[in-house]
Image (cartoon, rainbow, N blue to C red):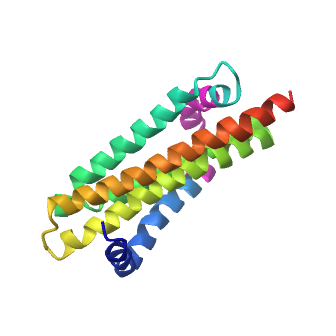
């Protein structure tokens, strides 16, 4: 895989990259600012379960890790499938907005329920991993966009290579979340109890 070609393609898609990142960022802002009681009720049990699993001995970190890897892989597989149909690429914006919205909603819940501890857990154990995974989705969308706009044919092998590259980026985000939670946040939690 030639990273110079990938870098050149990404530089040619600056506006598209910025617009996809903006959809994600707007989703985060909307999730933080415009959440209702019903949405919080829907997601609060998952946030509390994550908090308990991440910071206590009772928590199963492998389940959290594989859950994160599974969700990132499923969304990336959906992006992979959408990359072969040119009229569906605007759906990327919807998925990224919704992913940002859920992340923003979780940020509000972490802060309101657990205060500064919840905010720190959110920033270091949830947000960074999700931003890396979302960046992988944005990179994949940008790399496969030229194929849709110009009607040029990327080889299936090339799209598969992009998919594997972005899957590796997503895996890095999940590993970061796991390592940071295990090596830093859990010991800090135990020292302050």
Find out whether residue 3 is within the magenta segment.
no
Horizontally, residue 45 falls left or right of residue 99, namely right
Give above or below for 166 relative to 106. Answer: below
Could you say which quadrant of the image residue 50 lies in?
top right
Q: Residue furthest top?
A: 58
Q: Residue at x 26, y 52 (%)?
A: 80
Q: Residue at x 29, y 52 (%)?
A: 79
Horizontally, residue 193 falls left or right of residue 52, namely right
Give above or below for 160 relative to 179. Answer: below
Task: Identify the magenta region.
Answer: 31-50
Q: Residue at x 40, y 78 (%)?
A: 15
Location of the N terminus by quadrant is bottom left
Give above or below for 139 relative to 100. Answer: below
Observer-nearest of 28 and 163: 163
Q: Position of residue 122 (x, y in %)?
A: 66, 44
Location of the C terminus by quadrant is top right
The answer to whether residue 163 of the structure is visible from this angle is: yes
Give above or below for 22 relative to 96. Answer: below
Could you say which quadrant of the image residue 185 lies in?
top right
Q: Residue furthest right?
A: 192
Observer-nearest of 178 and 31: 178
Q: Position of residue 8 (x, y in %)?
A: 35, 79
Find out whether residue 37 is within the magenta segment.
yes
Q: How many marks?
A: 0
Dominant SS of magenta comes to helix
Q: Position of residue 170 (x, y in %)?
A: 44, 50
Q: Residue at x 47, y 65 (%)?
A: 21
Could you say which quadrant of the image residue 151 lies in?
bottom left
Q: Position of residue 107 (x, y in %)?
A: 64, 45
The answer to whether residue 34 of the structure is visible from this angle is: no
Horizontally, residue 77 falls left or right of residue 24, namely left
């Amino acid at each position: 895989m030639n990273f110079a070609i990938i870098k050149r393609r990404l530089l040619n898609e600056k506006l598209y990259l910025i617009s996809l990142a903006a959809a994600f960022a707007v989703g985060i802002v909307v999730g933080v600012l415009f959440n209702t009681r019903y949405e919080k009720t829907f997601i609060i049990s998952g946030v509390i379960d994550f908090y308990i699993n991440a910071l206590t001995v009772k928590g199963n970190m492998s389940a959290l890790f594989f859950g994160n890897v599974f969700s990132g892989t499923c969304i990336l597989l959906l992006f992979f499938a959408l990359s072969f149909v040119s009229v569906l690429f605007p759906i990327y914006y919807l998925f990224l907005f919704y992913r940002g919205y859920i992340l923003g909603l979780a940020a509000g819940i972490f802060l309101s329920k657990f205060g500064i501890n919840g905010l720190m857990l959110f920033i270091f154990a949830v947000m960074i991993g999700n931003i890396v995974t979302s960046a992988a989705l944005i990179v994949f969308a940008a790399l496969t966009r030229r194929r849709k706009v110009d009607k040029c044919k990327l080889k299936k092998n090339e799209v598969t290579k992009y998919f594997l590259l972005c899957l590796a980026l997503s895996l890095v985000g999940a590993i970061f979340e796991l390592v940071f939670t295990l090596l830093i946040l859990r010991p800090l939690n135990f020292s302050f109890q």
